[in-house]
């Protein structure tokens, strides 16, 4: 079963009601690797470990197929500070970096 | 070898380092050294050998591993030659802080690779432990490094970071 980027996005939207969410595929064509950047009120008062555990739990089914996942889980308060420093962050439609075929399969995390 | 001659074999690892082989069709058993398991020409004519190492064994082994040093990293490859960018990042960060660690290569041990994920309830490699406690993976260590929290966490387990300037 292929892991669709939209499936990952939908689940996260449904469960974490994010203020900001960006799921990027960085698989370079060899599999399913995602960068997740998510801002949610639900991360308030939680350690980094707890936040990532929450996301892992939500994506448990998809994790069987996902090869690598990086997460940046921040609270609305942290997000405000980040955007104040770097307004570009809030741009939803960033142009994806061109894939580099020489880097294939370098980053499998499982 | 015809299909009829094939036997389904069960293999159980014994404390002696030998394996108890049992044919499911004939019920015959014999023991052989572990490392001969796949090359021995058994009377039973092995076709399929299922190697069992019980989940309990693996868990006990991991419990010893995570406490084998103040900092323990389960990774792909070893500290000298990481085999994955995420594992390399963890090694680089710890080296930057001058923090010595023990590393275990999950690529060399399939039981460990799946066992560690279950042990820490964490789906990816690398995994970092301080004093037997799971700290996180690459993202978390990197974030702790950036925020300066890592220096404090190292201090808590009695390690002075090279980046600690006070």
Image (spheres, coloured by chain):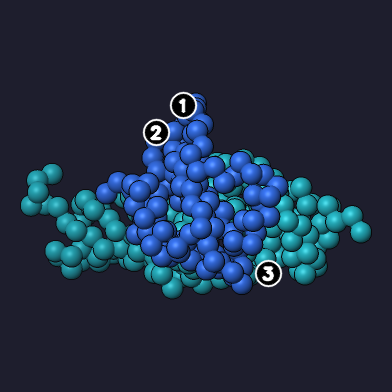
User: Residue beneath label 3, please?
Assistant: B131
Front label number (3 vs 2): 2
Spatial separation of the CA atoms under disc 3 and disc 1: 40 Å
User: Residue beneath label 1, please?
Assistant: A101
Q: Is residue B7 visible?
A: yes
Name the residue located 61 percent from the left edge and 41 percent from the top edge. Answer: A88
Q: Which chain is cyan?
A: B
B120 is higher (above) or lower (below) than A5 = below
Q: Which chain is blue?
A: A
Depth order, front residue of B98/A52: A52
User: Residue beneath label 2, please?
Assistant: A29
Secondary structure at numbered mark 2: loop
B143 is higher (above) or lower (below) than A89 = below
Pointer 3 chain: B
Name the residue located 46 percent from the left edge and 43 percent from the top edge. Answer: A24
Where residue A93 appears, as percent x and y from the top left, is 48, 39
Name the residue located 9 percent from the left edge and 46 percent from the top edge. Answer: B2
C-beta proximity under 8 Å, tags 2 and 1: yes
Front label number (3 vs 1): 1
């Amino acid at each position: 079963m292929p892991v669709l980027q939209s499936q990952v996005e939908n689940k996260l939207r449904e469960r974490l009601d994010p203020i900001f969410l960006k799921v990027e595929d960085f698989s370079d064509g060899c599999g399913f690797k995602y960068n997740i950047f998510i801002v949610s009120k639900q991360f308030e008062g939680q350690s980094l470990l707890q936040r990532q555990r929450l996301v892992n739990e939500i994506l448990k089914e998809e994790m069987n197929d996902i090869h690598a996942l990086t997460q940046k889980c921040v609270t609305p308060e942290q997000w405000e500070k980040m955007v104040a420093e770097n307004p570009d962050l809030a741009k939803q439609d960033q142009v994806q970096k061109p894939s580099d075929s020489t880097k294939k399969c370098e980053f499998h995390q499982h | 070898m015809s299909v009829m001659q094939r036997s389904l074999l069960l293999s159980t690892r014994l404390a002696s380092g030998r394996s108890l082989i049992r044919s499911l069709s004939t019920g015959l058993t014999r023991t052989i050294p572990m490392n001969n398991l796949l090359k021995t020409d058994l009377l039973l004519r092995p076709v399929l050998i299922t190697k069992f190492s019980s989940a309990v064994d693996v868990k006990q082994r991991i419990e010893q591993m995570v406490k084998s040093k103040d900092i323990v990293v389960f990774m792909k490859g070893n500290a000298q030659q990481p085999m994955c960018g995420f594992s390399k990042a963890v090694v680089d960060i710890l080296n930057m802080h001058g923090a010595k660690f023990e590393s275990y290569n999950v690529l060399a041990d399939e039981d460990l690779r799946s066992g560690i994920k279950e042990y820490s309830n964490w789906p990816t490699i690398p995994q970092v432990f301080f004093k037997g406690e799971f700290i996180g993976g690459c993202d978390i260590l990197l974030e702790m490094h950036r925020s300066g929290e890592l220096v404090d966490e190292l201090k808590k387990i009695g390690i002075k970071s090279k980046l600690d300037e006070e």
